[in-house]
């Protein structure tokens, strides 16, 4: 949940490979995926974001958009309603 909160708040999100939900972060699109959660790999990724302002701006913008599209309450409620209707239909 923390990663989603950071994405929504406009932070550049850096995660180690395998340390987050698959499909949530795409390297260079809405965050940075370091080779591992090792301090050296995370530091390299931080330098990547800090040295390229355009990259950082693009990542934060796309991260926010990802959260708005996937975790908006209207989207979540709509998906839940669909699943509940489907489950109810199976019992008929």
Image (cartoon, helix red, strand yellow):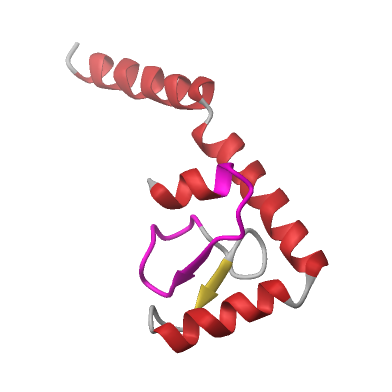
Res. 69 image quadrant: top right
- The residue shown at (33%, 15%) is 85
Looking at the rendered image, the quarter that the C terminus falls into is top left
Rendered view: 2 above or below 37: above
- The residue shown at (66%, 42%) is 65
Rendered view: 43 above or below 29: below
Coordinates of residue 77 in the picture (x, y in percent): 43, 20
Task: From the viewer's side, name the closer residue of 86 and 50.
Answer: 50
**Residue lying furthest left in this view?**
91
**Residue lying furthest bottom in this view?**
40
Residue range corresponding to the magenta coloring? 7-24
- The residue shown at (68%, 72%) is 49
Q: How many numbered marks does the figure carry?
A: 0
**Residue lying furthest top in this view?**
92
Looking at the rendered image, the quarter that the N terminus falls into is top left
- Queried whether the magenta region covers residue 22, the answer comes back as yes
Coordinates of residue 39 in the picture (x, y in percent): 42, 83
- Queried whether the magenta region covers residue 86, the answer comes back as no
Task: From the viewer's side, name the closer residue of 65 and 80.
Answer: 65
Q: Main secondary structure of the magenta part?
A: loop
Coordinates of residue 70 in the picture (x, y in percent): 53, 38
Query: In the shown orientation, is residue 38 left or right of residue 7?
Result: left
Rendered view: 6 above or below 51: above
Coordinates of residue 7 in the picture (x, y in percent): 56, 49
- The residue shown at (17%, 16%) is 91
Res. 38 image quadrant: bottom left
Query: In the shown orientation, is residue 21 left or right of residue 24?
Result: left
């Amino acid at each position: 949940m923390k990663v989603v909160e950071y994405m929504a708040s406009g932070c550049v999100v850096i995660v180690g490979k395998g340390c987050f939900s698959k499909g949530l972060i795409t390297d260079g699109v809405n965050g940075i995926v370091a080779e591992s959660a090792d301090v050296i790999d995370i530091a390299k990724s931080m330098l990547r974001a800090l040295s390229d302002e355009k990259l950082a701006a693009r990542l934060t913008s796309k991260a926010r958009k990802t959260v708005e599209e996937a975790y908006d309450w209207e989207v979540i409620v709509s998906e839940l309603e669909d699943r509940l209707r489907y489950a109810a239909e199976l019992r008929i």
